[in-house]
Amino acid sequence: MAELAALVAACPWLWDALTAVRRSGLPDAWIGAGVLRDLVWDERFGPGFDASRVKDVDVAFFDPTDLHRDRAATELLATLLPAVPWEATNQAAVHTWFPAHFGGAPVPPLLSIADAVATWPETATSVAVRLDAAGELEMCAPYGLTDLLGGIWRHNPRRTTMEQSRQRLARQRPAERWPGVQVVTE
């Protein structure tokens, strides 16, 4: 945890984003997935992290009382920190749209942020962080940090099929973007 915490703390851009998420008041809100992978792998295996290359900042929040607020949450974050490409998703609502958007069988409702993070496409992106009320960094990493810190791209079979994983691998090209990253295909 200390290694990831040090990288996050050394990135003012990401720290500002975490502060905005905390200030937003979104329930159980975390930043995770690709932006954390990009930070770690850019620093360890690439040219160094550059926020201008960030495609989006995934904010996962959990609000079972309102399943229709993704757009409003994204807009709220944009008012707090307009330079960040926010993408907020209420993980409590994923089961209502996931099959129509990505295909496949219906998915059961997620029970918590930890349950949601455990379904993300790769083990290295199944990580989220947030600032607690005291401004301390908290982490959610259901599969641990070994793959993220070690540069291992590994399919997470909890929700993503092997074919979907291959398609993501072709789009993301991790071995090209980050020499030294190991792709594990099972």
Image (tube, rainbow, N blue to C red):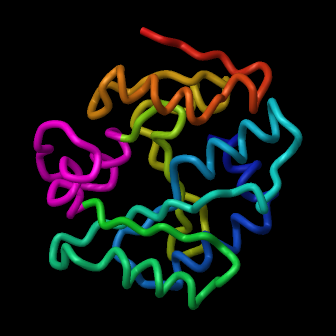
**Observer-nearest residue: 16 or 6?**
16
Camera-side residue: 84 or 114? 84
Tell me where residue 186 appears, x and y as whole percent: 42, 9
Rendered image quadrant of residue 174: top right
Front in this rendered view, residue 52 or 124: 52
Residue farthest right in this picture: 47
Query: Is residue 111 at least partly visible in the picture?
Result: no
- Residue found 15% across the figure and 60% down from its top: 96
Instruction: Give, as a single range, the part of the protein colored magenta.
Output: 92-119
x and y percentages locating residue 172 in the rendered image: 60, 35
Question: Where 56 sits versus 144, above or below?
Answer: below
Q: Is residue 2 left or right of residue 62?
A: right
Is 50 situated left or right of 34 in this image?
A: right
Number of numbered callouts drawn: 0
Seen at 47% across and 64% down, the residue is 59
Compared with residue 121, is residue 31 higher up or lower down, i.e. above or below?
A: below
The image quadrant of residue 43 is top right
| Point 70% across, 67% down: residue | 15
Residue at the image point whose x is 42% and y is 84% from the top: 25
Q: Quadrant of residue 68?
A: bottom left
- As for residue 45 lying within the magenta part, the answer is no
The N terminus appears in which quarter of the rendering?
top right
